[in-house]
Amino acid sequence: MKSQSTINVYLITGFLGAGKTTLLNHLLKSLEGSRNVVIENEFGKASIDGNLIAKQYSQLYELNNGCICCSLDEELYDVLNVLAFSEQRPDNLFIETTGVADAGTVAEIFKREDVGKVFKLKKVICVADAETVEDYITETEETIRQIVISDLIIINKINFVSPEYVAKLESLMHSLNPFAEIILSADGKISIDALEGERQEKTPDISEIEQNFKHTNVHKIKTVTYKTENVYYRDYLMHALNVSLMIHYKQIYRIKGFVKFEGSNEKVLVQSTGKRLTFENYGTWEDDDPISELVFIGVGLEMAAVQRILRPAIKKVTNDKLKTMRLAIKGGI
């Protein structure tokens, strides 16, 4: 095999809902014309984010057997081997980790001599949600790890907080990682020039971080996926999810999925980030009998609790409930 150039690697990290996929889409569109490969790490079996990534890539690999930092010897190495020995190597490799991954452990793999001959880790990029990152820093070790290991920190969604609070976050990020470049963004978009330059060797060593933090919280985080062939009532679902997020936002890290609403064939993307819930039309359903799928990621989640949240918003269940109520009234209960 003839000698080929090394592959530039960009590791995108950040807690759940920070805007990693939005950033990735922007970078892929900006690099249209290059050979770009994406490794998307799905936490759990659902593959929602893979459907949301822009098509400006040559190949997309989805690692969905758990957190990428826990399966380095399996799927990730297999993909890297395929890329290393491919007839035409890609120019860029983007790795979007699950929001609970230990980015430092993933970055360590590219320091290996055999891997470094083919792959050049250019940047570790951390996307931080301006609304929620301070809470996550207080409550989760992974968020601190992601910030400390990064070369570039993007404080995202700054339009939802005050300028004074943004300045506070900048100071906080600098105190955690004085070597990282900090960029402010409202929509996850940055200049492609931010990818230039070499990875800072002064970034704190992983072994130093390990002395203070242990990789434990990720294993407490659960993914619950709820699927149904029935349609949802839009207002009912919005109310149910908004109430749940307001009350349990520290427990429910992320909600994402596609649903079908009563009276419409629109494929609607449902997403939550922190306490914020959005519904976005995403084309139309191609299947005659589409299956709505919502993925909940958080601490201590149980299917029974998710069912209690969603069941009143599902058309069939709601109709059955009303029928039961009518029978109860007739029976004098």
Image: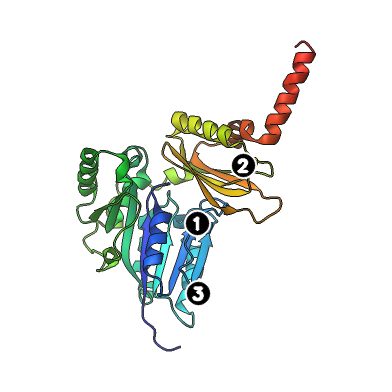
| Colour scheme | rainbow
The answer to whether 83 appears left or right of 169 in the picture is right
Decide which of tag 2 and tag 3 comes sooner along the chain: 3
Residue 103 appears at what percent x and percent y? 37, 55
Seen from the viewer's position, the closer of residues 302 and 182 is 182
Reading the image, the residue beneath label 1 is 52
Residue 189 appears in the rendering: yes
Residue at the extreme top of the image, as rendered: 332
Front tag of 1 and 3: 1
Q: Which residue is mark 2?
A: 261
Say if 168 sits above or below 92 in the image. above
Disc 2 versus disc 1: distance between alpha carbons? 20 Å
**In the drawing, does residue 80 fall left or right of residue 104?**
right
Q: Secondary structure at mark 2?
A: loop
The answer to whether marks 2 and 1 mark residues whose Cβ atoms lie closer than 8 Å is no
Q: How many marks?
A: 3
Give x and y (percent) for residue 244: 50, 31
Q: Residue furthest right?
A: 331
Res 210 visible: no
Residue 204: mark in rendering: none
Q: Nearer the viewer, mark 2 or mark 3?
A: 2
Observer-side mark, 2 or 1, equals: 2
Mark 3 lies on residue: 82
